[in-house]
Image: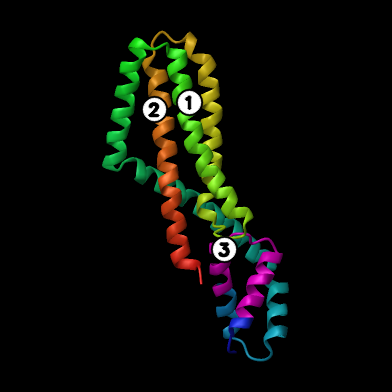
């Protein structure tokens, strides 16, 4: 059976209907379905309907599996970004500057400023992701998990603001907020790289 461009659009539309929301996963599953149908003979619509009835649950399982694989891969990319020399240097610079400022500035004011910087970077990353998602463009699975990580860091940062006064040393607090700033910057950079990669691979 020959699969036409119109057939590909039909497959894509049906995958959206069954809950395959992300363009990169949908592209992979569309290719999977099209390959299976190419091996069959007869009318496309009949073969396609029969295939979807038989394989709908399997496609949903594949969708979930691919999403979690993408989630894992995206966070591996963050780690790879963080260990790059420029981010290691940034970590040393931010921590050293924070330590020097802690000598002349109240710790509560300093950590509040560092937390604010983290919030700004995290907000920019999250807003860009939301705009891309709700605009219907560039809705890819590989960057969704960054929002979860940002929320974890946000909650931890809020908790640390109240907990820092019980610590005997300011170093753990400064180290924590340095990590959050560098990690959020790494997520922003990685997000932009991932979107560029996905667009080159999946945008028609």
Going 48% across and 49% down the picture, which residue do you hit?
A: 72
First in sequence: mark 1 or mark 2? Answer: 1
Task: Read off the magenta span.
Answer: 7-31
- Near mark 1 (Cα within 10 A), the count class, few <14, some 14-19 or many ≥20, is many
Q: Is residue 22 left or right of residue 106?
A: right
Q: Quadrant of residue 201?
A: bottom left
Q: Is residue 16 magenta?
A: yes
- The local crowd at label 2, few if under 14, some if 14 to 19, many if 20 or more residues have their Cα within 10 Å, is many
Q: Nearer the viewer, residue 80 or 64?
A: 80
Q: Which residue is pictured at 54% across the width and 33% down the height?
A: 152
Disc marking residue 28? none
CB contact under 8 Å: marks 1 and 2: no
Q: Quadrant of residue 37?
A: bottom right
Taking the image as shown, residue 191 lies to the left or right of residue 100, namely right
Give residue 202's position: percent from left, percent from top: 49, 67
**Dots 2 and 3: beta carbons under 8 Å?**
no
| Mark toward the start of the polypeptide (2 vs 3) | 3
Residue at 41% across / 53% down in the picture? 193
Mark 3 neighbour density, 10 Å: few (under 14) some (14–19) many (20 or more): many
Mark 1 highlights which residue? 115
Magenta stretch mostly in which secondary structure?
A: helix
The residue most toward the bottom is 42
**Residue 6: percent from left, percent from top:** 63, 82
Q: Tell which of 115 and 9 is nearer to you.
A: 115
Kindly identify which residue carries mark 2: 178
Location of mark 3 (residue): 23
> Regarding mark 1 in the picture, which secondary structure is present there?
helix
Q: Give how far apart the Cα atoms at labels 3 and 1 are.
A: 34 Å
Q: CA distance from mark 2 to mark 3?
A: 35 Å
- Residue depicted at 52% across the width and 26% down the height: 156
Looking at the image, do the residues carrying marks 3 and 1 touch, with CB atoms under 8 Å apart? no
Which of the image's four quarters has the N terminus? Answer: bottom right
């Amino acid at each position: 059976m020959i699969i036409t461009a119109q057939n590909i659009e039909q497959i894509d539309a049906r995958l959206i209907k069954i809950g395959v929301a992300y363009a990169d996963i949908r592209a992979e599953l569309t290719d999977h379905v099209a390959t299976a149908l190419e091996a069959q003979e007869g009318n496309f619509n009949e073969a396609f309907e029969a295939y979807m009835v038989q394989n709908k649950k399997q496609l949903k399982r594949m969708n979930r599996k691919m999403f979690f694989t993408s989630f894992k891969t995206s966070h591996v990319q963050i780690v790879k970004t963080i260990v790059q020399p420029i981010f290691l240097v940034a970590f040393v610079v931010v921590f050293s500057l924070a330590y020097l400022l802690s000598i002349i500035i109240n710790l509560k004011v300093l950590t509040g400023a560092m937390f604010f910087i983290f919030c700004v970077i995290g907000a920019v990353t999250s807003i860009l992701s939301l705009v891309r998602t709700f605009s219907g463009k560039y809705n890819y699975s590989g960057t969704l998990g960054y929002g979860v990580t940002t929320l974890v860091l946000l909650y931890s940062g809020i908790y640390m603001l109240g907990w820092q006064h019980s610590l005997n040393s300011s170093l753990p607090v400064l180290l924590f907020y340095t990590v959050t700033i560098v990690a959020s910057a790494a997520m922003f950079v990685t997000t932009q790289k991932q979107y560029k990669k996905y667009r080159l691979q999946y945008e028609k």
